[in-house]
Image (cartoon, rainbow, N blue to C red):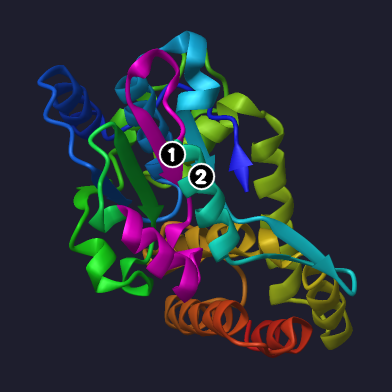
Amino acid sequence: MFYAACFMQIIGNQKIIKLLERIVAKKSIANAYLFLGPTGVGKLEAALFFAKKIVNNTEAIDSNLIMIAPETEEKNGVIKKRDIKIEAIRELQHQLSLTSTGGGYKAVVIDEAERLNVTAQNALLKTLEEPNAQVVLILVAQNERKLLPTIISRCQKIKLGLVSDSEIVNGLPQNMVNKDDIIFWSAGRGEVAQSFLRDPQELEYRREIKKDFLTLTAGSIGERFALAEKWSKDTSDLPKKMDIWTILLRQVMLDKIKIKQLSPAKALLVLEAMASSMKQIKETNANTKLVLENLFLKI
């Protein structure tokens, strides 16, 4: 799916941002980049920042800056993200064959590039093997192992990571309320901190998901199965929910917070079970509701 690109202030990873600015200033722009890092650190925001600097044409930003990301689909009441298929790459190749507005660069950002299926990756490889000096491809991914080695070898890697609490605070407005909550829930990830500025309801969302977790630790089998059925209806949101639970579990493991009936040792076991369950949901055709039921019984 193609999207109009936008840009917001980036919190954290300022060394990377300055590096990207120097690359553009020195006109040492490569044909392809791979932005890597954990969920929520701001990979996409940094990629869009870089792409906008490359295009450097605010009047033609929509035509010269292209973004591709997975679409979602609903089937039998369940919402899932789809792989990026070859049709999206063929359409991209058509767009790239057109002269850019103003005669400058065209920049392409592919979010969640690991969701490119094999045929789409092979089609993209052709574009990488025959680079256009006026086109810059920027892939954004969390798991590079799902990308073809031949694609990775043609990209310059830009790695973003977790940042300190002070970097998060420095990126927040001085009069920002709930700073402690923002630091806790962002867990060193600037993109997550940014989400709280865009939408104050994001903090409330995390409180609700935390409430679900606390209810689950002392809940009946019926309550566990009811939550599994509810969450299985929209798997596109599952990684975000599990990420919130991961923050809670890590805090328990570090003995920074106490959750009744959950020792640090059990928290580690639950983390491992969550990782296994999410892999099963993402990479197989397993019944999501059954996977979640089995997971919730272990909490």
Residue 256's disc is: none
The residue located at (42%, 27%) in the rendering is 99
Magenta residues, start to end = 98-127
Left or right: residue 296 versus residue 26 is right
| Residue 120 x, y percent position in the rendering | 48, 66
Q: Quadrant of residue 64?
A: top left
Pointer 1: residues within 10 angstroms few (<14), some, or many (20+)?
Answer: few
Q: Is residue 84 visible?
A: no
Asked whether residue 146 is drawn in magenta, I would say no
54 above or below 74?
above
Q: Nearer the viewer, residue 196 or 61?
A: 61
Left or right: residue 206 versus residue 28 is right
The residue located at (59%, 67%) in the rendering is 83
Marks 1 and 2 in Cβ contact (< 8 Å) = yes
Left or right: residue 99 versus residue 25 is right
Name the residue tied to disc 2. Answer: 94
| Residue 200 x, y percent position in the rendering | 67, 28
Q: Amino acid at mark 2?
A: His
Secondary structure under the numbered disc 2 in the rendered image: helix
| Residue 183 x, y percent position in the rendering | 45, 37
Structural distance between the alpha carbons of marks 1 and 2: 5 Å
Pointer 2: residues within 10 angstroms few (<14), some, or many (20+)?
Answer: few
Name the residue tied to disc 1. Answer: 97
Q: Quadrant of residue 281?
A: bottom right
Asked whether residue 103 is drawn in magenta, I would say yes
The residue located at (56%, 34%) in the rendering is 195
Q: Nearer the viewer, residue 29 or 256?
A: 29
